[in-house]
Image (cartoon, helix red, strand yellow):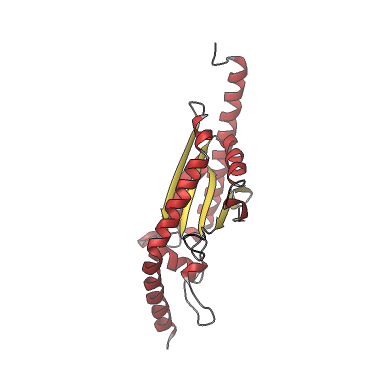
Amino acid sequence: MTESEFGAAVTNRLRDQYFLLLPKIRLVATRLDTEIRYHIRRIAQELDPYEQIIVRSRVKDCESAIKKLRGEGNVFTPERTYSLTDLKDLAGVRVLVFPSKRLSQIDELLRRIEPFRVWLADPLKYAGKSREAPKYSGTFDEISSEIQGEYQIVPMLIGNFLEVEHSAMYKPVGWAKGADRDEDLGALRKQIEESLMVFEKRFEDFVEQNRQSFPLSQ
């Protein structure tokens, strides 16, 4: 069997596996979304008018899951056994927070509840890997002990940029292929992420200065 034939065979098998797993992947995504919304509801009720918390859930689509298993070489090799259950993010939730002062509050709260207290940490790195956001993966065993879910708690400005950047650079079509390997784009991406964090920090400082000088109760 040639490399091309082997890759096609693995791809077809993984597509079959994906649609067998899909009903439970959706259940995991729904459970993850529901648990997070329920447990952060009191924080959401306490927000100042300028603060925002947005919860976004998603089910990883079939082709994205297969591509992730292929890895950087974008090929399947006979030396490995491939299964979609190896992926940690078949179901995912991203909690977007603005400003970031609420991020650690949400993180600490979720880490105290079951089953999240035993989920594995794998921080999301950004701004040239100099900054981290909380990210965890694990299972709801009553739904499936094999299908892993993932949740992230991310500064909103960074999270929205990452969604655009990921779609443009890591799911490219046509002339956009290879954008993720362009050094100039990589340097600009880092600058944008750092600038967003500088803006957010300045905004938080401005609000705090005004809070002390002009209390809302006046």
Image quarter in which the N terminus is found? bottom left
Q: Nearer the viewer, residue 162 or 13?
A: 13
Look at the picture and state if 43 lies above or below 138.
Answer: above
Q: Residue at x 39, y 80 (%)?
A: 9
Residue 126 appears left or right of 62: right
Q: Is residue 77 left or right of residue 23?
A: right
Q: Quadrant of residue 173?
A: bottom left
Residue 126 coordinates in the image, percent (x, y): 57, 50
Residue at the outermost front position:
142
- Identity of the residue drawn at 58% across and 14% down: 214
Q: Position of residue 23 (x, y in %)?
A: 38, 62
Q: Taking the image as drawn, is residue 161 in sight?
A: no
Rendered location of residue 89, percent (x, y): 49, 59
- Whole-percent x and y of residue 52? 48, 34
> Residue 211 or 186: which is nearer the viewer?
211
Q: Residue at x 44, y 67 (%)?
A: 67
